[in-house]
Image (cartoon, rainbow, N blue to C red):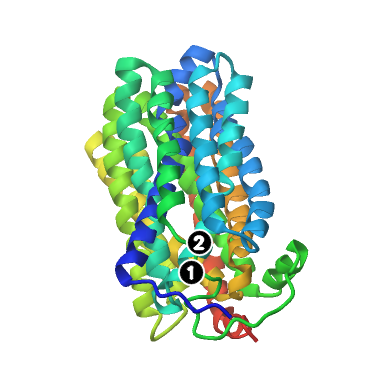
């Protein structure tokens, strides 16, 4: 038997930093289309429904379905190599997006980005859960998840200014190629940890489970069912409203794309970073006394966020709208770290990458897949009546999935302790 490796606290922090950087590139390349979509819509003659397909459903279908076999492979092989290759592929396809001349070509390029990104998060989640023990896992996964908003921050800022002065095609080139270099840094400096390395319980040698068997394990836990659906509905609004908020600012508040990119980068970037980190940090600390706080925190954040959601839609002052959107971005980001950590606590170490993939399948199919498509469709439907303000009234639909999400988080909390106890039984 080989000797158990020793990783310093500093090295674990370095691995977390590098993987957070990977996730940053993930969202730079995924969300860059959001800030560029008004320019792309104008040049290629697209509808809001087509934009919803590009930023949502079509991307999500390939992202979540291919995430399953890649995660299955990751549970049995070297996860670091999978993440590195995935990063290189999606970065290349982002750059290719700048060469397209019609909707179909852009759709195919974005499918390529989705295929690459499918190998990013589930293996990264699994690596992090092996480097960090259960009592620090939600915090570590929340730090990793801040990559979402760091990516949005850089993507919006750089994308908006590059679009205004050099065109949307150049934005894809400039923001796509650096990820290929970063993939080499990951490949040569991050070590693959043994599976189950940081778990207190000894990892029992069991036969490898098939995808169907892992899904059966997850579906046998009521916590996971409620949790995944709640997270999906939360993300439905995050992507649906979030992806159309830059066009909303352009059409309703008359802002230029560079100014939108700057303020959306600051507002969503910093708001999301604070919210994501806070969710994991406070879940780990409050969870010591009551594990249900992993689910109560998203509920509390949702309740506090109701007035800010109203303000961002209906206030006339652009400054107050942006301030309200900052608070909405912060509060809707609280759920992610606790949800990923809770999912990992429901299964043994050999199932974590696949469990993450199943969780993200539900989350992204509901949220990323149907969120932008729904709000784009509603905007097109309401345009004959409300004109440029169609998005304002489409956003009103957001309160329904938000309310259902909070109810589902509550039911997830009621079953968590029992389901978690059986994870390594």
**What is the distance, in whole Å, between disc 2 and disc 1 at their CAs?**
6 Å
**Whole-percent x, y for residue 344 in the image:** 55, 70
Question: Which residue is at the front of the view, 307 or 191?
Answer: 191
Q: Residue at x 65, y 63 (%)?
A: 76
Q: Is residue 153 left or right of residue 48?
A: left
Q: Give the residue displayed 42% in from the left and 31% down from the top.
A: 177
Closer-to-camera residue (210/148): 210
How many numbered discs sit on the rendered protein? 2
Residue 381 x/y as whole percent: 58, 28
Asked whether residue 16 is in view, the answer is yes
From where the camera sits, is residue 401 visible? no
> Residue 169, percent across and down?
43, 19
Above or below residue 267? Residue 260 is above
The quadrant where residue 298 appears: bottom left
Q: Quadrant of the N terminus?
A: bottom right
The numbered mark at residue 129 is 1
Is 386 located above or below residue 235 in the figure?
Answer: above
Q: Which residue is mark 2?
A: 125
Q: Is residue 326 above or below residue 55?
A: below
Q: Are marks 2 and 1 in contact (CB under 8 Å)?
A: yes
Q: How far across and how far down the image is residue 221, in percent?
A: 66, 75
Residue at 35% over, 28% down: 159
In the picture provided, is 91 more to the left or to the right than 255? right
Going 34% across and 51% down the picture, which residue do you hit? 272
User: Could you say whether the residue bearing mark 1 is in a helix, strand or loop?
Assistant: helix
């Amino acid at each position: 038997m080989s000797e158990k490796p020793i990783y310093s606290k500093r090295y674990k922090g370095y691995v977390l930093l590098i993987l957070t950087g990977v996730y940053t590139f993930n969202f730079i390349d995924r969300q860059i289309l959001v800030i560029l979509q008004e320019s792309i819509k104008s040049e290629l003659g697209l509808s809001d429904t087509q934009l919803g397909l590009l930023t949502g459903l079509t991307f999500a279908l390939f992202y979540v379905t291919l995430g399953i076999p890649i995660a299955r492979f990751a549970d049995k092989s070297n996860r670091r190599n999978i993440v590195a290759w995935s990063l290189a592929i999606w970065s290349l396809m982002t750059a290719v997006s700048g060469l397209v001349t019609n909707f179909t070509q852009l759709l195919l390029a974005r499918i390529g980005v989705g295929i690459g990104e499918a190998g990013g998060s589930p293996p990264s989640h699994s690596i992090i859960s092996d480097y960090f023990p259960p009592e620090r896992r939600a915090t570590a996964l929340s730090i990793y998840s801040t990559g979402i908003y760091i990516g949005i921050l850089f993507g919006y800022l750089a994308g908006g200014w590059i679009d205004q002065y050099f065109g949307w095609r150049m934005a894809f080139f400039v923001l796509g190629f650096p990820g290929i270099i970063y993939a080499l840094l990951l490949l040569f400096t991050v070590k693959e940890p043994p599976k189950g390395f940081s778990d207190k319980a000894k990892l029992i040698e069991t036969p490898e489970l098939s995808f169907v068997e892992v899904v059966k394990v997850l579906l046998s836990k009521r916590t996971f069912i409620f949790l995944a659906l709640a997270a999906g509905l939360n993300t439905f609004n995050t992507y649906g409203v979030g992806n159309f908020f830059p066009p909303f600012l352009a059409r309703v508040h008359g802002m230029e794309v560079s100014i939108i990119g700057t303020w959306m980068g600051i507002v969503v970037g910093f708001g999301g970073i604070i919210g994501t980190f806070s969710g994991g940090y406070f879940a780990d600390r409050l969870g010591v006394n009551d594990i249900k706080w992993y689910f109560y925190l998203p509920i509390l954040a949702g309740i506090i966020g109701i007035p800010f959601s109203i303000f961002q839609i209906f206030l006339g002052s652009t400054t107050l709208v942006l301030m309200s959107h900052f608070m909405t971005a912060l509060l809707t980001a609280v759920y992610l770290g606790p949800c990923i950590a809770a999912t990992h606590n429901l299964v043994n170490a050999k199932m974590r990458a696949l469990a993450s993939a199943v969780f993200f399948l539900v989350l992204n199919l509901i949220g990323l897949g149907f969120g932008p498509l729904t709000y784009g469709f509603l905007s097109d439907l309401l345009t004959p009546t409300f004109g440029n303000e169609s998005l304002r009234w489409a956003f009103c639909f957001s309160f329904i999935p938000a309310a259902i999400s909070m109810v589902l988080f509550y039911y997830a909390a009621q079953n968590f302790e029992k389901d978690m106890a059986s994870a390594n039984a």
